[in-house]
Image: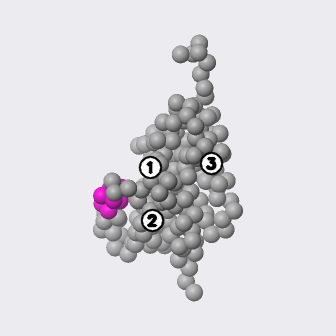
Amino acid sequence: MKQKTAVYSGSFDPVHFGHLDMIERASKVVDRLIVSIFNNPAKKCLFTVAERKAMLEQLLKGHSNITVDCFEGLLVNYLRSKNLRVVIRGLRAVTDLDYEFQIAATNRTLFPDIETLFLMPRQRYTYLSSSAVREVAAFHGDLTKLVPPLVATQLKRKFPERSDNQL
């Protein structure tokens, strides 16, 4: 029997509960899921690829059918290099649909064999984005409902609290 493997890619800068919800649910739809961190050298990220990979591996270590990987360049080239054809993408709200549809159509133009499966996160995560998490962390807000403790600790290291005389 042929195993179905899919790739769930993103920057994961940082990984949050919405990502983890998508990963958990996607891992139940396919036999094997590769969570692949997209390294975009043109984008200034808060965490290095190695830091993001380490966090994801730690958070997902109990899932035998999930592996964490990294890539740079076009997703279709990454898929070809792995001999894969299925991509998982998340849709948080209708605003994501237009963007994700464009990406899926472009990917299919470049790689006609690709299949993109769209999953919606649980309702409580539809507002959640990495940029929102970074902003809350930068202003020392409560991260408990946004990210796991491991990620919160790493964010606090990136945004140390200032004393009054540093303002």
Q: How far apart are marks 3 and 2 (CA)?
A: 21 Å
| Callout 1 secondary element | loop
Residue at numbered disc 3: 148
Which mark is nearer the camera, 2 or 1? Answer: 1
| Callout 2 secondary element | strand
> Crowding at label 3, few (<14), some or many (≥20) Cα neighbours within 10 Å?
some
Q: Distance between the residues labelled 1 and 3?
A: 17 Å
Residue at numbered disc 2: 119
Query: Hey, what amino acid is under mark 1?
Result: Tyr
Residue 55, placed above or below residue 87: above
Q: Which residue is drawn at 58% across and 40% down?
A: 143
Measured as percent of width and height from the top left, residue 19 is found at 52, 55
State yes or no: discs 3 and 2 in contact (Cβ < 8 Å): no
Q: Residue at x 53, y 77 (%)?
A: 4
| Callout 3 secondary element | loop
Closest to the observer, 34 or 142:
142
Residue at numbered disc 1: 127
Highlighted magenta segment, given as a residue range: 96-102
Asked if the magenta segment contains residue 101, the reply would be yes
Side of 80 relative to 158 (left or right): left
Query: Hey, what amino acid is under mark 2?
Result: Leu
- Of pointers 2 and 1, the one earlier in the residue sequence: 2
Asked if the magenta segment contains residue 57, the reply would be no
Measured as percent of width and height from the top left, residue 96 is found at 36, 55
> Crowding at label 2, few (<14), some or many (≥20) Cα neighbours within 10 Å?
some
> Crowding at label 1, few (<14), some or many (≥20) Cα neighbours within 10 Å?
few
Measured as percent of width and height from the top left, residue 21 is found at 55, 59
- Point out the image quarter for the N terminus: bottom right
Measured as percent of width and height from the top left, residue 65 is found at 62, 69
